[in-house]
Image: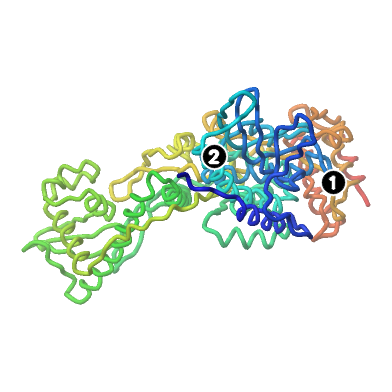
């Protein structure tokens, strides 16, 4: 007999949580999830009690296609009981929250997809739209009666319970993101699809400001109004990194290079991962652990790596206490331990050898039990074949350490949540990009695949940029002294214009912003009304330049931390006069600039 599945207790749980999320004053009706009005002729759908202006639990019967549709609904068709905003204004924050959390939501309910409408309708909502993210189930018809199998019924009940967590994520996201602009949502959407973008525009348009907002939104799902709080939050997380390029910046500074280190009065040249390679490795570890296909292997790999670290510490203590020698054959001994290898030597040798930690890990994971298997393992570094005896001896020593200490891998493995790692490259075009990026130009397009670096660490020169590492560059379009971005790089980045705009802020000098803007564009008033229009050049702007590239940005006209007289005298006027010297503005603009007085 099929077990009876009830929604009663779940209805009460749903109602109580909705009351909390929607900040309702009265308690919900007990035992009710869907509201269906039989008096409404022709209505074949129902939504959760009170869900007219929210994300909805939705269920509908389509008698034409013999389908039952259910899931999470976004309704911008009407407003049932509130009319101080339009339907789109009510629903947009819920839609934004879905877009920002889409990856997590799809992981939680992987069998769901858009069954009414599509993703683009959430990005660009309009009145009279309805979007349903859910499932379609076939129903049976016998004369005028419709039915579903018991198994299908059970599946629907379970799905309605499973979608409750995504419902809460979207509702909570809406509560956190009411003040998030549509520009940020669209930029996030472009970035998550393309993986890397460049915010380009003239000085003072808030490109770095916008990039930090995007990073905080991706990491914390909200944007702090207090930028000091934002700065602290971003600095505290390992998911964020900001660097600034300059003309002297090199591949060896950014990706991987050789560093000289002094150890025991000896100079040792070590290849090290730099900013990007370190950050990519951190992101890759999370990416692997968030994949259900690889999580157990990676968890085992991490356990072995951690055990090797403890083994190295054990060896260091042994060497300190035993005249810096641990014999592995009658003539060969372990002599020292470095960050990346276990070194061995013989009194008859002039140069010592070493087993890379990465190869010790590979040998253990491969289950090697004989010396010849060391030679046969193709993933080991080349020297393994000729020095297999010593490598196998060190592997045996590692296994003995595990046995002696009764160490054992815990098979309880949990799936980690995939995180976004955000790298902001400020002034990205000030460096010689082809030289700085090197082979990463390929890796940017083929995320998750290995590329070969010009430098190797323990004879491994591979690098991987995982899909969860997102790169935001900023570029000042008025700076003609910076490096050229070639087509190969342009093809791999999305370029987005960040232009000057009027700010709704009491500390914003709107009148002077308009005056200065007239040096660059002739249709300022039309632009304020519609920022999609084509900009018309001012009579003062040289024919060689576009307004989009040189027009002075809005941040120059914010007076929160400085009086405007000072800003006008020491910031705005000097850069405008520099524009005349550089031929950006015509000489006729000089009188206009000199007359910019309070």
Above or below residue 307? Residue 87 is: above
Mark 2 nearby-residue class (10 Å; few <14, some 14–19, many ≥20): some
Residue placed most toward the observer, 353 or 68: 68
- 10 Å crowding of disc 1: few (<14), some (14-19), many (20+): few
* Residue on which the image places disc 1: 82
- One can see residue 414 in this view: yes
Tell me the element at label 1. Answer: loop
Instruction: In this rendered view, identify the residue nearer to me: 282 or 416.
Output: 416
**In the rendered view of the protein, which quadrant contains the N terminus?**
top left
Check residue 284 in the rendering and tell me which mark sits there, or answer none: none
Q: How is the image coloured?
A: rainbow
Place residue 338 in its image quadrant: bottom left
**Residue 232 percent location from the top left of the image:** 63, 63
Q: Is residue 501 left or right of residue 137?
A: right
Q: Classify residue 18 as left or right of residue 438.
A: right
Residue at (47% x, 48% y) in the render: 276
User: Which circle's residue, 1 or 2, is located before the other in the chain?
Assistant: 1
Q: Position of residue 505 (x, y in %)?
A: 84, 52
339 horizontally vs 540: left or right: left
Residue 159, relative to residue 588: is it above or below? below
The picture quadrant where one finds residue 27 is bottom right
Residue identifier under label 2? 153
Q: CA gap, disc 1 to disc 2?
A: 35 Å
Residue lying farthest to the bottom in this orientation: 321
Q: Where on the picture, by quarter, is residue 74?
A: top right
Pinpoint residue 172: horizontal percent, then vertical percent. 67, 53
Residue drawn at x 23%, y 53% as measured from the top left: 364
Residue toward you, 222 or 87: 87
């Amino acid at each position: 007999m099929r077990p009876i599945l009830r929604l009663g207790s779940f209805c009460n749980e749903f109602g109580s949580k909705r009351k909390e999320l929607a900040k309702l004053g009265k308690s919900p009706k007990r035992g009710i999830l869907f509201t269906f009005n039989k008096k409404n002729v022709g209505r074949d759908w129902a939504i959760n009690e009170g869900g007219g202006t929210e994300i909805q639990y939705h269920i509908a019967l389509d008698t034409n296609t013999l389908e039952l549709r259910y899931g999470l609904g976004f309704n911008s068709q009407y407003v049932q009981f509130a009319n101080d905003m339009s339907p789109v204004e009510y629903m947009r924050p819920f839609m934004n929250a879905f877009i920002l959390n889409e990856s997590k939501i799809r992981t939680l309910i992987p069998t769901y997809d858009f069954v009414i409408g599509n993703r683009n309708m959430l990005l660009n909502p309009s009145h009279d739209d309805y979007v349903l993210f859910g499932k379609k189930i076939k129903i049976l018809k016998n004369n005028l009666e419709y039915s579903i199998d018991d198994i299908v019924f059970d599946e629907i009940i379970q799905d309605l319970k499973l979608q409750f967590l995504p419902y809460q994520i979207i509702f909570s996201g809406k509560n956190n993101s009411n003040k998030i602009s549509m520009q940020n949502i669209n930029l996030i959407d472009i970035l998550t699809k393309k993986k890397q973008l460049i915010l380009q525009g003239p000085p003072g348009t808030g490109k770095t400001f916008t990039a930090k907002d995007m990073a905080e939104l991706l990491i914390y799902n909200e944007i702090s109004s207090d930028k000091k709080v934002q700065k602290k939050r971003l600095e505290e997380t390992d998911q964020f990194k900001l660097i600034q390029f300059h003309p002297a910046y090199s591949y060896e500074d950014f990706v991987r290079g050789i560093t000289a280190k002094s150890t025991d009065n000896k100079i040792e040249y070590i290849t090290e991962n730099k900013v990007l390679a370190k950050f990519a490795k951190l992101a890759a570890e999370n990416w692997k652990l968030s994949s259900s296909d690889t999580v157990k292997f990676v968890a085992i790999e991490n356990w072995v790596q951690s055990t090797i670290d403890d083994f190295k510490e054990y060896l260091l203590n042994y060497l300190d206490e035993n005249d810096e020698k641990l014999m592995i054959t009658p003539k060969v001994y372990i002599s020292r331990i470095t960050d990346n290898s276990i070194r061995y030597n013989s009194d008859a040798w002039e140069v010592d050898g070493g087993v890379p930690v990465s190869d010790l890990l590979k040998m253990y994971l491969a289950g090697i039990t004989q010396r010849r298997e060391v030679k046969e393992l193709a993933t080991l570094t080349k020297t393994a074949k000729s020095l297999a005896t010593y490598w196998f001896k060190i592997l045996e020593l590692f296994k003995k350490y595990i046995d002696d200490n009764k160490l054992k891998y815990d098979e309880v493995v949990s799936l980690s949540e995939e995180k976004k790692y955000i790298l902001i490259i400020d002034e990205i075009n000030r460096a010689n990009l082809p030289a700085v990026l090197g082979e990463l130009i390929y890796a940017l397009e083929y995320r998750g695949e290995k590329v070969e670096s010009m430098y190797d660490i323990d004879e491994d020169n591979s690098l991987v940029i995982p899909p969860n590492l997102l790169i935001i560059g900023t570029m000042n379009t008025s700076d003609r002294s910076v490096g050229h971005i070639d087509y190969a790089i342009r093809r791999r980045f999305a370029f987005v214009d960040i232009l000057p705009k009027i700010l709704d802020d009491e500390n914003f000098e709107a009148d002077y912003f308009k005056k200065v803007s007239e040096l660059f564009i002739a249709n300022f008033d039309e632009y304020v009304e519609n920022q999609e229009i084509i900009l018309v050049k001012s009579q003062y702007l040289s024919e060689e330049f576009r307004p989009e590239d040189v027009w002075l940005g809005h941040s120059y006209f914010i007076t929160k931390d400085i009086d405007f007289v000072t800003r006008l005298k020491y910031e705005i006027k000097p850069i405008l006069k520099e524009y005349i010297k550089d031929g950006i503005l015509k000489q006729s603009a000089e009188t206009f600039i000199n007359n910019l007085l309070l």
